[in-house]
Amino acid sequence: MNSASNTANRQVAVWLVLLAAAGTFALTMGTRQTMGLFLSPLNTATGLGIGSISLAFAFGQLWWGLTQPFAGAFADKFGAGRVLFFGALLVALGTFITPYMQTTLGLVIAIGVLSAGGAGMAGPAVLMATASRMIPAEKRGMATGIINAGGSFGQFVMAPIAGALMVAAGWMNAMQILGLIVLLALPAAFLLSGAPAATTPAAQKPIGTGDAIRTALRTPSYLMLAAGFFVCGFHVAFLATHLPGVIASCGLPLQFGAWSLAMIGLFNIVGSIAMGWAVGRWRMKSLLSLVYATRALAVIAFLLAPKTGTVMLLFAAVMGLTFLSTVPPTAGLVAKLFGVGNMATLFGIVMLTHQVGGFLGAWMGGKVFEATGSYDWMWYIDIMLAVGAALVHLPIREAKLARPAMVPA
């Protein structure tokens, strides 16, 4: 009887951890992924130009990545609760004050430093590493898929809410309401601040952060994984920032922009959970190659198809299936190669390369549109990068690396 009770309690604890992590990611990611809807109103209100505003969004992509290795290292050493709590506060603050910014520097600080930095602190590196420590190893693949799906669910819910708020209350009030909604993530920080499960034998010390980073940077498979994630960041940031603009340039109403972002979020829930299930059954590097090849084919089909509302929604659905489904196998490969002791730090570094790609995707989208009057060249670059990413994952070696010598406790 006690055994059955203990098993039930463990299962409840696992689901509480997953719901807290997925809910936090839903609120922070969902808010960030709606920002593309505000690009045009910000341009109209400030007169700064699409290129200058895209720079603020692009800096946010980069800063989101830069914060994650440091937030991950802090969480690895001191626990995730404080990091997540402070991160949610920064997202709320940055989003709330953005409507008051009238200069490029002001937008960079509000969107690029405060909001994006907070989202990085309460982002996938810390959330997935925390969950990986608190959840049994056999459940980690599905756990990362569920947490990742939380971010997608947030986008699916928040994009239509943002669109409706913009129509009903104006874009400034809509953005500030979204900032307040993020504060709902604060209670989850306390739930995820519990002591993590041990990740190394009691007679051994875990590898230090510096040694773990040096080992990873000397590992070709880790570098190839980071290169592929760079491409993912380029794709994701371009779509999140400029897909509403792409739709508007095709003469379609604002609602299609909001619903296209929502479709990406909805179908990424399916893609993330399916990928979490697949991670335990097929080679993760092969799954990643399949995702990038699918993206290349989807963009080619989109360029050849007529630009109707139905086509836009179908394209958004297909891209949604692949949008963040790269995260579970990427996180899984980091854990498989190096263990979970320094996972938040090492996955945070991979996320940094993702966001360097995100910076270029968001910024180049605006510059290319200003220079050519269309997004065509961005789609061509998307295709080439997707093909390259599909190929670069194939040589990755999934066998677990030999652990460096441990120091006796």
Image (cartoon, rainbow, N blue to C red):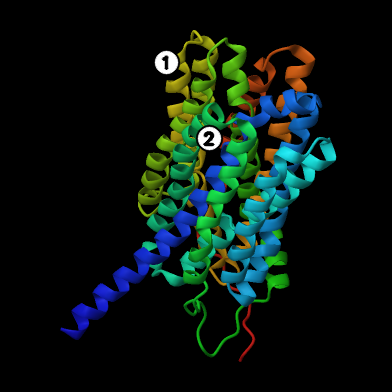
- Dot label at residue 60: none
As drawn, the residue found furthest toward the left would be 1
In the image: residue 341, left or right of residue 209: left
Please give the residue where the numbered disc 2 appears in the rendered image. 162
Res 5 → quadrant:
bottom left
Residue lying farthest top?
Answer: 306
Is the residue 329 above or below the residue 57 in the image?
Answer: below
Q: Quadrant of the C terminus?
A: bottom right
Q: Please provide percent x and percent y for residue 266.
A: 41, 36
**Relative to residue 100, is residue 345 drawn left or right?**
left
Three-letter amino acid code at the position of disc 2: Ala
Say which of 143 and 217 sits in front.
143
**Tag 2 secondary structure:** helix
Quadrant assignment for the N terminus: bottom left
**Which of label 2 and label 1 is nearer to you?**
2
The residue lying at 60 percent from left, 84 percent from top is: 205
At x 80%, y 24%, the residue is 47
Please, is residue 213 above or below residue 144 in the view? below
One can see residue 94 in this view: yes
Q: Position of residue 102 (x, y in %)?
A: 81, 35
Q: Looking at the image, which is closer to me, 40 or 167?
A: 167
Q: Which residue is mark 1?
A: 310
Farthest residue toward the front? 169
- Asked whether the viewer can see residue 232, the reply is no
Residue for point 50% across, 35% down: 159
* Picture mark count: 2
Q: Secondary structure at mark 1?
A: helix
